[in-house]
Amino acid sequence: MIGNQSESLGGKIVVATRTTRSKKVKPAEDQDRGFMAAFRELGMEKGINPEILFDAIEAALVAAYKRNFNAAQNVRVTLDRTSGQYHVYAIKTVVEEVVDNVQEISLAMAQQISPNYQLDDTLEVEVTPANFGRIAAQTAKQVVVQRIREAERGIIYEEFSSREGDIVTGLVQRVENRNVYVDLGKTEAIMPQAEQIANEEYAVNDRIKAIIIEVKNSTKGPQVLLSRTHPDLLKRLFELEVPEIHDGVVEIKSVAREAGMRSKIAVYAKDESVDPIGSCVGHRGFRVQAIVDELRNEKIDIVKWSEDPAVYIANALSPAKVVSVDVAESEKMSRVVVPDYQLSLAIGKEGQNARLAAKLTGWKIDIKSETQAEEEGEFQPPVADEPLTDAVDDMGGDDFLAEFEKDTFEADEASEAGEAADSAGEAADTDIASDADVADGEADGTEIEDAADDEAAPQAEDKIEV
């Protein structure tokens, strides 16, 4: 902007000029191009296809036009993906006689636009308002924000809904109404009280592992539910800590868990050279100890799976030792006999060991001690010295037994004779020792008497002299 000011100095007119700099305004076309480029970058940053945003803007502009100009008109909006220019077109039907000027156009007028138009054709007439720019910009902003939010929710829902049953690691954000809110990075998950380990405390910024049990798509966005009590959490932790399980060398057949207290896990290896229990325990117990620490000192029993139900049930009752297992396949029932001193260990505290074994195997388990089973006639203790009939028959049968009994009798007699001789020898030694003691005693007595006589003799002499 230039301003003029004149002054008279000595008959001369001096004109002073003042120049002010004005900001350079970018052309509207450049602004639109930058606007479209920003849309593309925003879509890439949020993981959203930019084409989805453009389609949403076009739909929003149609709604804005109907709301502000002509609600009854059928229109279409086109948005140039490069320049950002937009156009509004009214869609009309070619008719012989116009009844509705908003929806119809006469054949004569249509042929003035193009002679190729026929009856019942549709044509588009541009009706872009002159003052539609401000409304379009405001509408585009609102739609973009809304669509980005919806797209983000959709992406999060698809990502986590496909991960149900997977283990995740997050930070505890807060605890409200006994619910724990965990930050998973892209979204915030909820762990209800029912899915929390009893007596486990959660502090802000604690890093915990949990399993995704459900993903809900609500009006407020996707809602991810976590659990630390689900049996699959134990399974996923073993998959993380034990490479043999992750690679499929060792297989987890079953898991039974009472969260926070005790768990049992059955493992199996197809390769007989691989020890499935040792693989899970690890060197010096490092692998299983890492899982125990994550579950806040929850006890874990690792047992070997077997196709034989009796062997599997006996293993499941570990650490108790089992004498016998009888199974009824039709009823899925088993009767287990354990030593008397192992009964309480087999049942466990409040029946926990037996209950976990039943969950692990899927069988009903009835546990009895040897004494109880014998009293009920359900158990016969094994005979200690059963004759080996097959071997005896091979060696001669009854003749061999008679000879064996004779040799045994003679050996017993010889043994008794030897013992009698030893007893006699000991008695003789005792008698000899007694005689020797007596002889020694008599000898000592003789010596004492001689000494007494020697002492009495001088006294007698003294008496004679007096």
Image (cartoon, rainbow, N blue to C red):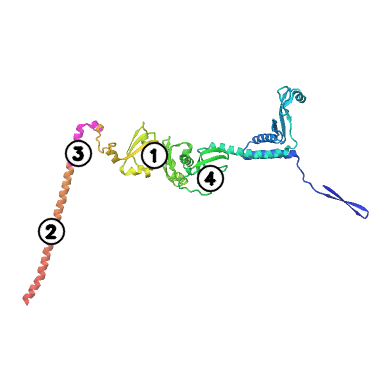
Looking at marks 4 and 3 on the same chain, the residue that comes earlier in the sequence is marked by 4
Q: Identity of the amino acid at label 1? A: Ala
Q: Dot 2 surroundings within 10 Å: few (below 14), some, or many (20 or more)?
A: few
Q: Which mark is residue 408?
A: 3
Query: Marks 3 and 2, how far apart in space?
Result: 44 Å
Helix, strand, or loop for circle 2? Answer: helix
Write down the region rendered in magenta: 391-412
Question: Left or right: 185 with respect to 236?
Answer: right
Q: Position of residue 209 (x, y in %)?
A: 50, 44
Q: Is residue 362 above or below residue 456?
A: above
User: Looking at numbered disc 3 in the image, what kind of residue is underneath it?
Assistant: Thr
Q: Of circles 1 and 2, which is in front?
A: 1
Q: Residue at x 12, y 65 (%)?
A: 448
Which residue position is annotated with label 1? 357
Horizontal side, residue 81 vs residue 195: left or right: right
The C terminus lies in which quarter of the figure? bottom left
**Type of residue at label 4?**
Tyr
Element at badge 1?
Answer: helix
**Marks 1,4: beta carbons within 8 A:** no
- The residue to which callout 2 is attached is 438
Q: Quadrant of residue 29?
A: top right
